[in-house]
Amino acid sequence: MVTTPPYLQPGDTIALVCPAGYMAIEKAQTCIDVLQQWGYKVRVGTTVGSDSKNYFSGTDEERLIDFQQILDDDEVKAVLCARGGYGLSRIIDKIDFKKFKKHPKWIIGFSDITVLHGHIYSNFDISTIHGPMAGAFNNEGYKNEFVLSLKNVLEGKRIKYECPVHEFNRKGEAIGELVGGNLSLIAHMIGTPSEMKTKNRILFLEDVGEYLYNVDRMMRQLKRSGKLEKLEGLIIGGFTDGKDTERPFGQNVYEIIHDIVKEYDYPVCFGFPISHEKENCALKVGVGYKLKVGKGKVTLEE
Amino acid sequence: MNRKRFLSSFLAPLAMTPVKGLPAFTDGNGDDSLAAIRPHYLKPGDTIGITCPAGSITQQEIQPAMLQMIDWGFNIKVGDTVGKKDFTFGGTDEERASDFQQMIDDPNVKAIMCARGGYGFVRIIDKIDFTKLVAKPKWIIGFSDITVLHCHLNRNYGIATIHSKMCNSFPDDWNKAEPIQIETILSIKQALMGAEKMKYSAPVNPLNKPGKAEGSLVGGNLKTIETLAGTKSDLRTTNKILFVEDTGEYLYSIDRMFWNLKRTGKLEKLAALIVGGFKIKPDDPGDEFGRTVEEIVLEKVKDYHYPVCFDFPVGHQKNNYALKCGLRHQLAVGEDGVILKEV
């Protein structure tokens, strides 16, 4: 049974960190302001708006130290990764989760942060939040239902998500622990100590900027490594900004996935609001959810 | 002969499902480095089959390769998938699997050259029945996407394969070809005929880690190796000499792939590491990764003491020599040169 960290109370502290790519402080400002409006104190890690000149928000050591300090700080009740990018794979094996295991707190993010979701859930059975990061608050994004779903999840409210049906959906109901994240990272972690467990669980996937052939290749890796066979349900989010090769692949992402899972009988839905776009709802990795893929709508609730 | 291999070469033909019938291969990254089943070398008059297990190619495009191999004294059997096209693929999955299958099963075909890479082998690998190949191994030739097959055969059956250029790399006009093109194409013939052992040299890179090693040679396209992790084609690398190459990847992605190798235990117990060509996709402005391929690699292997060399002539480039995967090689990385030779 998964451990859920304590939900947040007004006055609790949320910390912002950049464990992967660089983010300028201006881009995180709205998020900081809004978290304060929500009633939280905000602590900004040294990796947010750092003076790094390259891809990363700091050297591996700097990112590790910042993350570790915040992870171990008793005052901090939730850690919001300000952005993804790439970089957690470089430091994940150096993070010490000893204190976190005894006193879990919410870790929030998506994309490259999928490494943390996989690692923490599979090794410690502690729930994390797959959801919007700092950038999602900008341009009035903090007013939309997806950013607000993060507020609700942090407060411990149970949310029922709904989305329209898609012609490829396979109807049915499933109950199981929810796992998932970015397809590239889930594929990348297979065979490592952070590998995501999927058996008897509901799996969700999203990705951005991938070539169609590569989505096919990664989905086949999931299949051939046994990740798709014994699912309770499958939720396919957005695969935005996709690319194709000069010789067209001949199928779109949903056709690729539909084809690969057609031999199984669990419910599958497409177009669920989990993505690198605005449509990205906050979901608790590891927590039990009920997925209903119906004729008129799709629902997902705790 | 290693016991596992000895048994597998007997048991596999009898088993209904060859892979599942081999419990010895279900554990982690163990040592299976002693074994290698070497197919028979070719002699003039033997037949080479050409097939498209991945991307498509036209009849026209295989002509230079065909004529050259005929000139070497071989007969050519052109598979049904040559000239077929299903979008990017050389035919549907069924067509490609069945063409590859009949090349394996045809006793007259002594070697199979994959016409080109691209993408697609992983879509059909589990549909192929290797029973007859295990009973009577034959050389299979290719690289890039064909890495799926190199890894699958090494992992499950210990059958040696040839990692080399394919039909799409034979020069249109042999007389106008550059010396490096001729040399690399001739290395395929040399590997197939086995009259002399293979020997390669690579330039000195000041970042090489010097040393000597001996082990079974395995490897191929890095991205392909990564995406086989956790599957039954997953490469085992313990006590082996691993070579990797890739093309069109961002530096961050190359870094992530090397982390994958490291975190899946593939770097820890190597005999040696050979880094071939890496054609890098330039960083997007503002997203400079700030590390070279050499730095990326050296960082992952800094705790290990085996030799490492860079700029080895293997990859998506003109200097891409035929390498025999699965066979024992010696690598010497010295201050005045790098030598790899078949034992």
Image (tube, coloured by chain):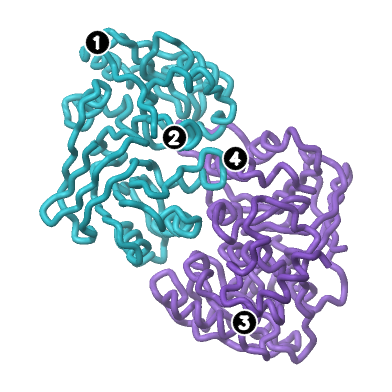
Q: Horizontally, is B93 left or right of B30 in the view?
A: left
Q: Horizontally, is B334 left or right of A299 in the view?
A: right
* Chain letter for the cyan colouring in the rendering: A
Q: CA distance from mark 1 to mark 4?
A: 40 Å
What mark, if any, has residue A10 been given in the picture?
1
Quick check: can you spot residue B9?
A: yes
The secondary structure type at the circle numbered 2 is helix
Residue mark closest to the camera, 1 vs 4: 1
Residue receiving disc 3 = B104
The quadrant the C terminus of chain B occupies is bottom right
| Nearest to the observer: residue B197 or residue A24 | B197
Residue mark closest to the camera, 4 vs 2: 2
User: Which residue is at 62% across, 82% downward?
Assistant: B104
* Contact between labelled residues 2 and 3, with CB atoms less than 8 Å apart: no
Say what amino acid the circle numbered 3 marks. Ile
Is the residue marked by circle 3 packed among few (<14), some (14-19), or many (20+) residues within 10 Å?
Answer: many
Residue mark closest to the camera, 1 vs 3: 1
User: Which residue is at 77% across, 67% downward?
Assistant: B36
Residue mark closest to the camera, 2 vs 1: 2
What mark, if any, has residue B259 been given in the picture?
4
Say what amino acid the circle numbered 2 marks. Tyr
Is the residue marked by circle 1 packed among few (<14), some (14-19), or many (20+) residues within 10 Å?
Answer: few
Q: CA distance from mark 4 to mark 2?
A: 20 Å
Residue receiving disc 2 = A121
**Badge 4 and badge 2 both on one subunit:** no
User: Which residue is at 21% across, 15% downward?
Assistant: A38
Position of residue B175 relative to residue B246, above or below, is: below
